[in-house]
Image (cartoon, rainbow, N blue to C red):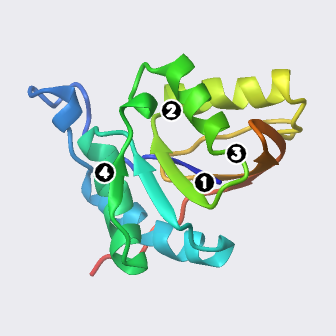
């Protein structure tokens, strides 16, 4: 399982619309493009899930296009849905999926893995925007987590 934090979005303070519709910034669009190479190196997933928030779906669109798979929206991994997100991730433990979510959700998932499954996250777990955690496990439990920092593609 690949757990992805959405790429860099436009600033909350400069966005007057519905936060669920807040798009990626130019940097975030380049991060979303860079994510494709990272995921392909790790082994492309068979399914791709995303929070329905625009910044998450935009993060995963280049990956879905490169894989030729549909993006599946998963409200369970929306911002603020910490308990639902943990259950969702555990349901797919050991499967070949990618899941894009938010910083608050990733933090809770990592805490759950460290506390409940005793997964070693290293001395200073990170969750930079557009980063990936490759999670290994099965039957609702995880045994290993490896962090991959974001990659930003060159501007076109």
Q: Residue at x 38, y 39 (%)?
A: 74
SS of the residue under disc 4: helix
Image quarter hosting the C terminus: bottom left
Mark toward the start of the polypeptide (4 vs 1)? 4
SS of the residue under disc 2: helix
State how far apart marks 1 and 2 are (Cα).
12 Å
Query: Circle 4 is placed at which residue position?
Result: 57
Query: Circle 3 is placed at which residue position?
Result: 93
State how far apart marks 4 and 1 are (Cα).
15 Å
Q: Do the residues bearing badges 3 and 1 touch, measured as CB atoms within 8 Å? A: no
Image quarter hosting the N terminus: bottom right
List the single residue furthest toward the front: 139
Query: Circle 2 is placed at which residue position?
Result: 103
Badge nearest the viewer, 2 or 4: 4
The one of 24 and 76 positioned closer to us in this rendering: 76
Badge nearest the viewer, 3 or 1: 3
Query: Circle 1 is placed at which residue position?
Result: 132
Horizontal and vertical percent position of residue 30: 36, 66
Mark toward the start of the polypeptide (3 vs 2)? 3
């Amino acid at each position: 399982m690949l757990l992805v934090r959405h790429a860099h979005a436009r600033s909350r303070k400069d966005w007057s619309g519905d936060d669920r519709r807040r798009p990626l910034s130019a940097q975030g669009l380049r991060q979303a493009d860079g994510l494709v190479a990272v995921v392909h190196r790790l082994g492309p997933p068979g399914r791709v899930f995303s929070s329905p928030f625009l910044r998450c779906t935009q993060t995963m669109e280049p990956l879905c296009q490169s894989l030729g798979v549909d993006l599946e929206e998963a409200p369970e991994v929306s911002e603020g849905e910490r308990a639902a997100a943990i259950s969702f991730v555990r349901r797919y433990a050991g499967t070949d999926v990618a899941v894009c979510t938010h910083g608050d959700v990733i933090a809770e998932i990592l805490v759950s893995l460290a506390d409940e499954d005793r997964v070693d996250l290293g001395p200073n777990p990170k969750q930079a925007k557009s980063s990936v955690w490759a999670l290994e496990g099965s039957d609702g439990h995880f045994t290993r987590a490896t962090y991959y920092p974001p990659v930003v593609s060159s501007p076109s």
